[in-house]
Image (cartoon, rainbow, N blue to C red):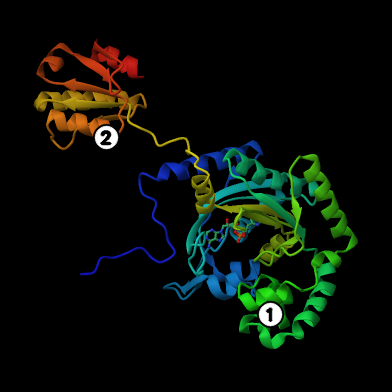
Amino acid sequence: MAQIKAQRGTKDVLCGESYKWQYVEQVASRVAKTFGYKEIRFPTFEDTALFSRGVGETTDIVQKEMYTFQDKGGRSVTLRPEGTASVVRTLSEHGAWGGLLPVKAYYIISAFRYEKPQAGRLREFHQFGVECFGSSSPASDVQTIKIGHTLLKELGIHAVLNINSIGCPTCRGAFQAALKEYFSARKEELCQTCNDRLERNPMRILDCKSPVCKEIAAGAPLITDFLCESCRGHYEALQEGLSEAGIPFVKDPHIVRGLDYYTKTVFEFLDQNGLALLAGGRYDGLVREIDGKAEVCGLGFASGIERLIGAMEAAGHSFGGDAVPKVFLASLGQKGVYAAEKLADRLRRAGIWAETDILGRSLKAQMKYADKIGAEYAVVLGDSEVENERAVLKSMKGDFSEELSFEEIAARLG
Ligand code: HAM
């Protein structure tokens, strides 16, 4: 029988690698908490309409990349391709908009997109994200970007912040008309999906991944030339706020982002190869779109955890190092086995990582194993040690060795 393998575009995290994930997740959670964010958790799958309406019918994500299926009850459900729409759905459903504002939530999730797997692009990937609701002030845009900036700095990752404003429905009307005129002239060269977008939402052509569409889009009109007074003012205040906060940025009028819900501010932190490590923006119409009634502004970002880890590995960072056992309690004979396990339990209750032999190996093999797993200390428990309740505690490096009572060993390692 053929061996069953992992699905294309998925990544296994083995036991010797997971400390890197834990490190990044801990730093991210800590940074978010210092800005007043609390963790939110929500289901992996949702009603398909949440994403088609929230993320946008004409986006690549909805048109090409969603894991959508019918459940046994005939409902159309979708594995979340991102977190923002789900956070809005969750908060709406639980009446968050009637409470204290702003609402600030962070999450660590798996997300699913049927994309062509390549470097930095997976079909199941993981995001750390933050979402803030209730503020229309550019100060909240600055603060959201500052959270991303702080996170990358804490992880020791160098990335360049690119910002843009993609306006609001008011200024977008004239922009969409200008795009339609521009792209109509080269209609035949555009891909099939973009031909459809030309009628329904020409702005989406700017985000198409096909090389020909990309090349045509490079010469398209720029949204920044169409911003209304309010959006222009917001964008200028953002730039001033970022400068004041000492966060360097580059203005890139070509950023449109791959999701339809954005208004005004959009931003991306890119690595030296142009890969987005962290990206987001403002979405003032999304709550209304999903809730149906409430008018609440929102903004946030998400960051690919695999990409953060990749960037840290490339920079040679240690992730705090993997943990090692404090002590290996080697045993000789059955009495020794029982005593080792008892002493180990005592240490474990005090939160100490204590290892014992569960393979019935020779003493020599046990000590070799203790060395291999990087134990800091070792103790050998045989008949006489058990009888006297005393044993030699020695450091594996060889710089410490002392005969102590079991009591003293526990105290010394604690
Ligand atoms: P996004 O740009 O689609 O935005 O994804 C955010 C980040 O997730 C990307 O910058 C990247 O680091 C990571 N990412 C996306 N797709 C993949 C993939 N296929 N493989 C590996 N990593 C990936 C959003 O998802 C928005 N919800 C962000 C947001 C939150 N905007 C406002 N609030």
Q: Amino acid at mark 2?
A: Lys
Task: Answer with left or right where residue 85 lies relative to residue 350.
Answer: right
- The image's mark for residue 372 is 2
**Residue 117 location (% of width, % of height):** 48, 66
Task: Answer with left or right where residue 325 lies relative to residue 9.
Answer: left
As drawn, 168 above or below 42: below
Q: Quadrant of the C terminus?
A: top left
Total numbered badges shown on the rendered structure: 2
**Residue in the picture at 79% in, 80% down:** 182
The reply to whether residue 296 is in sight is no
Residue in the foreground of this view, choosing between 102 and 65? 65
Q: Count residues near mark 1 (Cα–Cα under 10 Å), then give few for <14, some for 14-19, many for 20+.
A: some
- Ligand 1: image quarter: bottom right
Q: Dot 1 corresponds to which residue?
A: 197
The reply to whether residue 373 is in sight is yes
Residue in the foreground of this view, choosing between 270 and 288? 270
